[in-house]
Amino acid sequence: MNTHIFKHLASLLFFLLMSCSLMIQGQIRISGFVRDKNTSERLIGANIYIKGTQTGTVTDNNGYFSLVSAVPCSLSFSYVGYSSSSLDIFSHRDTLFEVPLEPGKQLGTVEVRGIRAPRANVASLKISELQQMPSLGAKPDILKSMQMLPGIQSQNEGTSRLLVRGGDPGQNLYLFDNVPIIYVNHLGGFMSVFNPDIINNIDIYKGGFPARFGGRLSSVVDIAQREGDRSALKGSFSIGVTDASFTVEGPLKLRNANFIVTGRKTLYDAYFLLGTILSGQNNLLASNGFHDLNGKFSWKPDDRNSFHLNLYQGDDYLNAWSFLKESGETQKIHIGNVWGNWLASGRWNRVVSPRIFMTNSLSYARYRLKNDLLYTVTDTVVNYSYSRKYLSSVQDFSFRTNTKFLVFKNWSADAGLQLSLFTHVPNNTYQSNQLIQTANEQLKTLESALYLDNKIVLLKRVEANLGLRLVNYSTSGYSGFSMEPRVNITLDVTEKHKLNLSYMSVTQNSHLLVTTGNIFSNEVWVPSDSRIPPARSDQFSFGWNGSFHQDMFQTELSIYYKTMEKLTTYKEGFTNLMGDADWRSKIISGGFGKSMGVEFLVRKTFGDWTGFASYSWSHTTRQYPELNGGHEYVFEFNRPHTASLNLNHKINEKWAVNLTWVYQTGLPYTPILGRQLTQNTMPDENGNYGYYEVLLYGERNSAHMRDYHRLDVGATLNTTTRHNHKATWTFSICNLYNRRNPYYYYYNSEPLRGLQTPSESAEFKPMNLYQMSFFPIIPSVSYKVYFDKSDPKRIKKPVNQRLKKWLYQ
């Protein structure tokens, strides 16, 4: 019986392949790259259509496209903000082109196709959209801008950490030009590490991952960097309330080679230090800040090959010094915290033929967290010193290769291999006063993945993306294998409306343990092993995408259901791994998560007013054997209702205004039901056992804080300096109506004491619930000036007429 069914399936597959093979005869493969005519920057998401048909495609993150057509034919190329272009094809051979598009205004309905069609489970942001959103410091923040989109939330107000469809912050894969970056936050989540000056395009996959993506349960943030201008040396300098930044880009002496370098540095390091000096508190000095540097170098020796080198380095630092001298004794204390990333990668892109495109990359990434303490005491007799050092790190050596190829006319595929060697140091502690130091582990893991994505178009109305990812993971004493099927089916109901159904299964072999609420990072990555199993997620989603009024309005509606198994977190009462050789005893595994939701987005893509409005409803839970008595509870960051509004208006060539409004259901918290006196387990100096007060908590996360909402407004002024350089002033006001949003709740008998601690006092005082808020109304301004060698020189003002007359005489 099984053999009979297999024969029928094989026969059917053979028939389909033969049919596709016959259909492709008399047609050619047309492929190439779409770039900016002036700068040669790749255009991601440019639209290519065969005139007279509904057949088309879009460029990928390399600006590459490929499609099949009968000849002769005429292709139309379009992109938002660029003039359209046409190309007539008469050759009967497979062809490869580079198509330049010239920046210009879009007029009429012909240009509308330059707008990228929405994709199910994928949210996209362009750098032009980021720059139109008001932000703290009057400079765009990539991750905070993403939080405006449905299905994407933040942990707390002011943080850049992303929670996607009920997931945790460590379940997001961040790709920087297809290279994973491990740590993505500055100042403990207050800002992101991504400098907007080097960003070309951002795609956020919330579900329905292609098989080439894996290793994280909740999302893929695919960030494409700019390549830099090939025409002339250019740059910019920007300064604002929070930081100063620069950009330099241009051609190199090597033919067809160019570069771009960007950098940022905080300005409030000095403010912080000066503030502690003026406060005069216990001779305490403190400084806090960050920096990051990005560099990308590209070389295109011919039409078929290109080479790219990416470099990144960024660090946060928090330092404190204390100096005390009295009675001939000198005490010095230095506490230093440093955390950040290193990243280096090389990539080779090759067009083997118009039907085959290959990408090969080799990368290295390292994240490390260091906490150091040095204490010294010196007097006429004693010279004592004590030091403590803590290190947690993870490094990733990876090789990736991917091949895009055409199987038949309506069948294209992506296949690839990924190899990653990780070295984890979860808890490395040194204390100078210990004769025997704690044994420190260095854990090596190897993760390899083989994948195949198939894109099959049936009857011109159904697009089936069928993929499979095979993952092998091994470490000392443990190995695992997983199969991850991916199914994504899209039905074109009409030319403007699509329905989508998707399913994906994903495995994650490393776990992020994060302590929230600290200005310095406590993000620690731990690998899976025999005691910490890999996490796994399954997600189903159904969606509709539609366009109205000649693509002026784009709408998306999605419904999803997601489960997460074998999750890992801290045990109750633990917030870090420091100082314990048996760090595994501080964490628990075997958690189960569940999330379901509805997401809606409507976007206005062009006109005097642009922007979007979004709404999402969701419900997310967690369940761990050792938390909440083993019962299911509401997730710490569950917000049932979220809504956002973004509006942008261009008044004229100089002025533009914008606003954003955000609403979210308040975060859950665990209420206190009462308190009682409990006897001390240790006697006092007189041998008596006293009593202290403890709080009695209710069900975990069973109450909600006040709802959160905030209005931000901004304005942009484009001007020219007296040296004829373009410049931009950006003004923003965050939290315009000064809403006191709760950051956290606390119980205490006095409002100014902060969190209540156990008290041994027998005096009874009533206890009340208080809220802590951090972000009032905050105005900001930034200034950015551009330098361009290709600009015409400044026209000198005429000499004073009276002086000219005198000289003439």
Image (tube, helix red, strand yellow):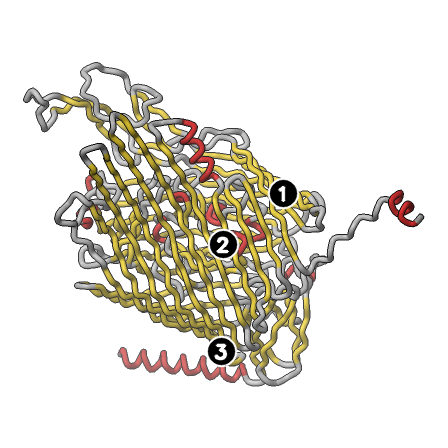
Disc number placed over residue 729 in the picture, else none:
1
- CA–CA distance between discs 1 and 2? 29 Å
Residue 421: % across, % down: 30, 65
Please tell me which residue lies in front, 668 or 490. Answer: 668
Residue 53: % across, % down: 63, 71
Q: Residue furthest front?
A: 380
Crowdedness near tag 1: few (<14), some (14–19) or many (≥20) residues, C-alpha within 10 Å? some
Q: Residue furthest right?
A: 809
Mark 1 vs mark 3: give the one in front: 1
Tell me which numbered mark, 1 or 3, is placed earlier along the sequence.
3
Question: Taking the image as drawn, is residue 78 in sight?
Answer: no
Q: Which residue is mark 2?
A: 123
Q: Residue at x 29, y 33 (%)?
A: 670
Question: Taking the image as drawn, is residue 469 in sight?
Answer: yes
Q: Residue at x 22, y 64 (%)?
A: 475
Mark 1 vs mark 2: give the one in front: 1
The secondary element bearing badge 2 is classed as strand
Please tell me which residue lies in front, 533 or 466. Answer: 533
The secondary element bearing badge 1 is classed as strand
- CA–CA distance between discs 3 and 2? 28 Å
Total label count? 3
Tell me which numbered mark, 3 or 2, is placed earlier along the sequence.
2
Please tell me which residue lies in front, 379 or 445. Answer: 379
Quadrant location of the N terminus?
Answer: bottom left
Q: Residue at x 70, y 43 (%)?
A: 651
Q: Amino acid at mark 2?
A: Ala
Please determine whether, in this image, residue 691 is positioned above or below residue 720.
Answer: above
